[in-house]
Amino acid sequence: MIKKSDIHIHIETKNLNVYYDNNYVLKNVNIEIPTKQLTAIIGPSGCGKTTLLKSFNRLLDLRDNIKTSGEILVDGENIFDSRVDVPDMRKKMGLLSQKPYPLPMSIYNNVAYGLRIHGKKNAKELDSAVKHYLQEAGLWNEVKDRLHDPASRLSVGQQQRLCLARAIAVEPEVVLCDEPTSALDPIAAQQIEKLLLKLKKEYTVVLVTHTLRQAKRLADHVVFLYFGKVVEQGPADEVFNNPKDPKTKAYIDGDIS
Amino acid sequence: MNKRKLRDFIGTKLMFTVTIFASLLFFAIFLILLYKSIFILETQSIAELLFSSLWNPEKGEFGLYPIIIGTILVTGISLIIAIPISLLSAVYIAEYAPGKIRRVIRPFLDVLAGVPSVVYGLCAFLFLVPLVKDVIAPWFGIESTGLCILTASVTLAIMVFPIIISLCVESFSAIPIELKEASLSVGATKWETVKKVIFRASAPSIISAVLLGFGRAFGETIAVNMVVGGIPRIPSSLLHPGQTLASLIASAYGEMMSVPLYESALMLVALILFVVVLLFNVLAVVVLRRAKRRWSY
Ligand SMILES: Nc1ncnc2c1ncn2[C@@H]1O[C@H](COP(=O)(O)OP(=O)(O)OP(=O)(O)O)[C@@H](O)[C@H]1O
Ligand SMILES: [Mg+2]
């Protein structure tokens, strides 16, 4: 049994509140996400999972109808602090979205995109880095002969793995995944799940998921969100086998969805 | 046949007919222009007409070269001014401006795009011409009436802005927010995202917008006519007067009736305008197809 004090906390929210216009979406959220584990955020549709996930790297800033209060500490530093360099902070947090969005460029350039931005210009270094991360994402063998094709020509499952390669190419510390398998067929979904299990050895993985079974298969730690409130959080086996809150139990038993 | 099916049948036939009619119009215009230009093409070779600098309708000399140069200069310079400014402004409106400003600016742009060109011509004549004459030309130590290539180019650039801006804002705003998030979340700055993702993803629309702007600048008649000077000579500087193809037709059509050859020469000019616009549209189709394939997301 791991003692609580052994777990290092990577991301922590303190009294996080988020409003869209007058819609109160996240209500006083206090959660802790442990380092190098896979944390699943579960909860019914519309409860604020995506919003919570995107608040971790301040992608919510893009929307102009949003209001946020509270703190989000990443490695103990509040990301809302005005001294924080937002692009640098985002670089530490890779994102895998619900539907794959390859950038409008070739397969190669999708992976090289972040590398180039952060100063890697040498062609040989780029070549080997692109190869490495495509291998990590389990895509290399399928695309090695057509690296310069537009990325949009890949299948959706391949695109999702490409997005994963793109995200980990800048060596983030956290990978944020928003229902990354919901647009995929079962085989492609399985590939992504396997990758996530591999990733959590090196990265802190936060996985928003709709499917309870997926959370059970993958998660070390679980946060249950219900109507914008955290109902329960803790180690996966405790939450799934011994839920403290009746709402969690109802959700796990499939009585509410 | 019952009533509904009959209506459907008639509707279909009607749509077919108007469509055919519209496409026939294209060929009709082309054939009329061609037919009317044959007269002058019989007396002078096309090369002579396009590359001779002598324009003296009274003497039967119809060298279009200076006017073609004037058209290229005026259209080209106006686009060189308009494109970068419009793109930056469109990016600002779509990506940087707060929602309130965006909602206020957009209707203005749409109105500007619809203002009749004679209004732009008038304003340019009242404000731009004196400015060029009294301020800009003296800077360069050139004597100018203010009616010149530069004035016409700037006027056209101003007319083209709202079109390009409006179309680009629309296409930038149509880019899914997730695409921007994908770029930002690898640590790209906003400007890097604009340059490498937004511009590319909307490349097809930018190309269409620029072509529409080109069409407006290239074919603009009255506003150019009011400020370009109307002299069919190769301008020795941008502060000297010139003439454009479209503006030439407008200024000469009153007098052309008396000289048959003159009328035919102007028809040839119209034919050139027609063919150039046609070529640019074909080019657009080809370029757009390639752009869409390369930069889809
Ligand atoms: N851009 C927006 N503007 C206004 N309201 C929004 C916006 N995005 C989300 N919302 C609202 O915020 C609430 C939470 O949305 P969110 O996308 O975080 O839910 P979710 O848990 O991810 O749902 P799902 O499982 O369906 O993806 C919803 O009620 C939604 O309608
Ligand atoms: Mg969601």
Image (cartoon, rainbow, N blue to C red):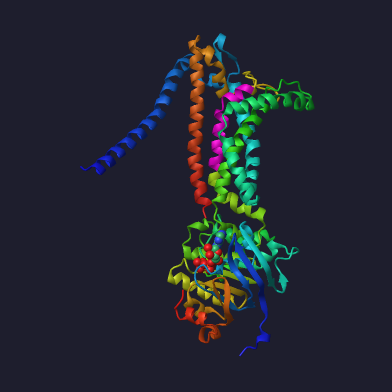
At 61% from the left edge and 33% from the top edge, which residue is drawn?
A: B159
Q: Main secondary structure of the magenta part?
A: helix
Q: Position of residue A20 (x, y in %)?
A: 59, 61
Taking the view exactly as shown, the residue that stands out farthest to the left is B1
Q: Residue B164's quadrant in the figure?
A: top right
Residue that appears at 32% across and 35% down: B14
Query: Which quadrant of the rendered structure holds the N terminus of chain A?
Result: bottom right
- Residue A150 in the image, given as x and y percentages of width and height: 52, 55
Q: Position of residue A122 (x, y in %)?
A: 67, 60
Could you tell me if residue A140 is visible in this image?
no
Res. A76 image quadrant: bottom right
Q: Is residue B285 above or below residue B192?
A: above
Report the span colored magenta: B206-226
Spot occupied by residue B191 in the image (x, y as percentages of width and height): 67, 53
Q: Is residue B8 magenta?
A: no
Q: Is residue A75 left or right of residue B224?
A: right
Residue toward you, A257 or B44: A257
